[in-house]
Image: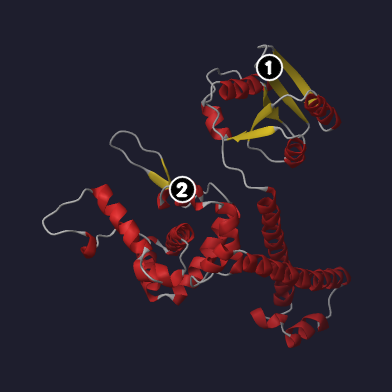
Amino acid sequence: MMIIGCDYHPAFQQIAFVDTDTGELRERRLQHREEAEKFYRNLAAQEMKMRVGMEASGHARWFERLLAELNFELWIGDAAVIHTKRVRKQKTDRQDAQLILQLMMEDRFPRIWVANWENRDLRQLLWHRHRMVQTRTRIMNQLQAVALNEGLRCKKRLWREAGREQLESFPLAPWASRRRRDLLEVLDRLTPTITELSQAIEQEAEKCPTAQRLRTHPGVGSLTALAFVLIIGSAERFQCSKQIASCLGLVPSEDSSGDRRRLGHISKQGNALLRFLLVEAAQVTVRSIPEWRSKYFHLAMRRGRKIAKVAMARKLAIQLFWMMRKGWDYEQVNRFGPHAGWVLSRENIQPGRRRGKNARKAIWAGAIARVPV
């Protein structure tokens, strides 16, 4: 078997590899893309079992496809954890490749979960629509500025037929008129594109049973539900709701030592798109559920609206996580609560007999599973 530690860069990669049968250690620098592809195809011709390890990084999709085509085992590691395992203060590409190889051989490589190719391709659909919507918003804001400069203030009415006619009728200077015309043309092209992408997201959400269950939650549409399913992947990866909030960057950063505890802003680690969608969806949920509205206004008066919105987004993420993990829709979660399996049941507790904490959990997990829904 051959184990390869790869320090990947967009233009090249530095590798350190060892043959476990002979113990021979070698190093090499490969330029992208022809030299690297030729090297790995030659290794594949030797019909040896190969394992390649690299840090999680961008711009490596072609490399991952190549290794999958050659049936090489690819391990992707957490770059931050690998960085903490570096002892020496000197940092070079050779030492990085040697460190990755050493961690793999010592079985200390911090391997992370990687989504499959279909999942990652669907994420491109979500990102593409998100960027198109952002571009359209910027263009609409520029046209609003043109209208305001001419004394027309009609906000959303500007995009109706009458508002559009008013905007086009203003006599402007030559380059200002050219700008207005170009912006309107781009806007007219973007709107049908975004509509087509939104319909594609609706169709993909219909194919996913988990996304359909998440859509039953007030404020959660096809876009948010599908993004949650794709980015979270398997709910069994997380042991508790705190981990899901930490994964999405919805927990405060912390710098504590001794008796001093200091909490800062949210960490903003994890997927930025899903965090944005959760904040947007949580505001709709607040308007739909009285209990959420009461909690939101209570937090807004104490800590401000921005913190209250993030807190509601965290609450929504936790509720969607439990719906996903238990396979429930919103009505079932509303009836039993997310921790229904942890409650005590009268019918399973015998008089005069005390049960341990784990036994009570097991009893109620089985009891809830038998409840007709």
211 in relation to 47, above or below = below
Three-letter code, disc 2? Phe
Q: How is the image coloured?
A: secondary structure
- Compare residues 40 and 160 and report the one nearer the observer: 40
Marker count (numbered): 2
**x then y, percent, for residue 107:** 53, 25
Q: Is residue 291 visible?
A: yes
Examine the image and state in which quarter residue 215 appears.
bottom right
Residue 41, label in figure: none
79 up-or-down from 88: above or below: below
**Up-down: is 54 above or below 276?**
above
Residue sitting at x 43%, y 73%: 331
Q: Position of residue 24 (x, y in %)?
A: 69, 11
Asked whether residue 267 appears in the rendered view, the answer is no
Disc nearer the start of the sequence (1/2): 1
Which residue is identified by label 1? 19
The residue drawn where x is 69% and y is 65% is 133
Q: Quadrant of residue 50?
A: top right
Q: Position of residue 206 (x, y in %)?
A: 63, 69
**Residue count near mark 2 (Cα–Cα under 10 Å), binned few <14, some 14–19, many ≥20:** some
> Looking at the image, which residue sits at the far right?
174
Q: Secondary structure at mark 1?
A: strand
Question: Which image quadrant is residue 277 in?
Answer: bottom right
Q: Is residue 284 left or right of residue 145?
A: left
Q: Position of residue 97 (x, y in %)?
A: 66, 23
Residue at image location 16% in from the left, 52% down from the top: 354
* Closest to the observer, 337 or 135: 337
Q: Which mark is residue 238?
A: 2
Amino acid type of disc 1? Asp
State the separation of the CA atoms marked 1 and 2: 36 Å
Q: Can you say which quadrant of the picture contains the C terminus?
A: bottom left
